[in-house]
Image: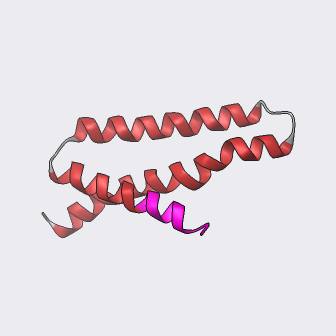
Amino acid sequence: MIYAIPALFLAGGLILGVVLARLARWGVFWSAMAAALVLAGWLLVSARGKSDGWDAIATFLPALLLLAPKVLGMVLGPAVVRISGR
């Protein structure tokens, strides 16, 4: 089950990246990418402020398991469109 949730976020990011690349909505694409990266950065910064190690892990875990696969999928989406030539 631990692999299913990041895989779903990877698939969601991949689908979103492919759809936005095919529609040539690059403003929306970069806005979604920036929002995910800002949220991951905010989680990282807030995890550094925690005094207990387990609190920091619980804060940064969503960025690691959810946002990283989504950003990877959104990067791979336009690459798939570029390779397929459509």
User: Where 82 sits versus 40, above or below?
Assistant: below
Decide whether the magenta segment is chiefly helix, strand or loop.
Answer: helix
Residue under the point 23% across and 48% down: 20
Picture mark count: 0
Magenta stretch bounds: 1-10
Query: Relative to residue 11, is residue 19 drawn left or right?
Result: left
Residue 22 locus on image (x, y percent) = 16, 54
Residue under the point 23% across and 67% down: 83
Which residue is most to the right?
Answer: 52
Q: Quadrant of residue 25?
A: top left
Query: Relative to residue 82, is residue 48 drawn left or right?
Result: right
User: Where 45 sits versus 54, above or below?
Assistant: above
User: Where 31 sits versus 15, above or below?
Assistant: above
Residue 5 locus on image (x, y percent) = 53, 61
Name the quadrant of the N terminus: bottom right
**Near-viewer residue (4 or 29):** 4
Task: Assess whether residue 60 is covered by the magenta stretch.
Answer: no
Q: Quadrant of residue 60?
A: top right
Residue 71 locus on image (x, y percent) = 44, 50
Name the quadrant of the C terminus: bottom left
Query: Relative to residue 79, is residue 8 drawn left or right?
Result: right
Task: Assess whether residue 8 is covered by the magenta stretch.
Answer: yes
Query: Relative to residue 56, is residue 18 drawn left or right?
Result: left
Residue 58 locus on image (x, y percent) = 73, 45
Residue under the point 45% across and 57% down: 9
